[in-house]
Image (cartoon, rainbow, N blue to C red):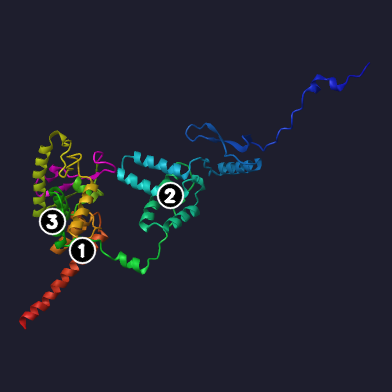
Amino acid sequence: MARKNPSNNSSNNKPRKGKEKELPTNVRERNGKYHYRYSIKNPVSGKRIQKESVGFATPREAEKEGRRIEAEKLLGTYVDKLKDTVADWCDHWLNWYASTGRVKEITINQRANMLGLLKSQIGGLNLQEVTEEIYQEVLHRLSIVHSFNTLSSMHGVAKRVFLRAVQKGKIKSNPAEHAFIPKKTKTFEEREASKKLPRFLEKHELIKFLAAVEGSQFRRVFALLAYTGMRLGELSSLFVEDFSDEVYLNISKTRYAPASIVKYQLTSPKNESSDRIIHLSQRAISVIKEQIVWRKAFAFSKGNDFYKERQFLFVCEKARAGYPLYPTLVSKQMKRALSRANLPSNLTPHSLRHTYTSLMAEAGADLDTIQAQLGHKKGSAVTRAIYLHVTKAREKRDVDRLDALLDACE
């Protein structure tokens, strides 16, 4: 019997498959990368969730990552690896912060600006990659070009952002918790500059300035700021009815308009103490009464083109007549008047708040009364400095009276 040729066996004619790669347990290859596959328990439903690690170049690296994950699961310190970058989480936090409804839009914008500094440094890093050392280095780098106050604001927001990440199980600990803001040693010139008082108008300068203001309404705006110490946002949000008793003025809101005259917002004042009733001098009362008369005549002249939804005391005159005054318009008018009066151009509407402090101090008012009128929650260092500056000059004049008294007897 002829022997069968093994090569004629049909089963042997099938091509042999190459030897498959032997991968470590739970390591899978996909698109040239190696991933460790594992499961975790959903803390809410109790069901198992299939997860996969990030991709690695070699099976050994994926296996090493798997050992780390399993060890942390046993120790109870496991935090799921996430794709969120610092920039992603900052944006997420800001949206959540805004959605609480407990903060003003201006505050949200301020927080966004501060987070912009953080994102400019480490925005591309994964949240889990940010260590205490990395965050501390961010503060050191930013301290070279930014002030201590700016860094303090950014650091405060950053701590809240990372704390939220801890609370949501995104990271294990807050990398900003124990960080510190570097303090720069001030030069002699910087120390001397910090001692200088903010610029304000003396009595004769105020009279000169008001005389140089164009437009009767703007003259009353600047006069009332100087006679009451109100913030510009508080003045521009006043309703006619806030002067109902013709003795006091009710300060219960402030105007916020980041982009346009029409899209204004009325929000609560700067802080709790800013919500106040202020006493008015006869000069201030006269200014308000003149403004009410002017406003009534102006509204009548505009007819249906005048904004009537709310009765603002001070209003836009040209575009959007009747809407509350826009801060930029007031600042421009002040710059022009300062130039015409040959006064320092760096003065602003807020400088009139400091002017009020100096006038009240010179008139003999005590510091507590001034700060209550200004709506300060606690003693303002700037207000106190101006007060002491003015009262020291007054004290010197009082002491000089002794010489005058004795000279009269000689």
Give the mark toward the camera: 2 or 1.
2
Residue identified by numbered label 2: 118
Residue identified by numbered label 3: 211
Q: Residue at x 45, y 44 (%)?
A: 87
Quadrant of the image for the C terminus?
Answer: bottom left
Instruction: Say if 244 sits above or below 383 in the image.
Output: above
Identify which amino acid the numbered label 2 is placed on: Leu
Please identify the residue farthest to the left as the structure is shown: 409
Give the mark toward the camera: 3 or 1.
3
Residue 369 image label: none
Q: Count of labels shown?
A: 3
Please identify the residue farthest to the front as the structure is shown: 340
Give me the C-alpha separation between circle 3 and circle 1: 26 Å
Is label 3 in a helix, a strand or a loop? helix
Q: Residue at x 48, y 31 (%)?
A: 45
Residue identified by numbered label 1: 387
Is label 2 in a helix, a strand or a loop? helix
Seen in the image, is 43 located left or right of residue 267?
right
Image location (x, y in percent) of residue 333: 20, 51
Give me the C-alpha separation between circle 2 and circle 1: 38 Å
> Which tag, 3 or 1, sits closer to the chain's start?
3
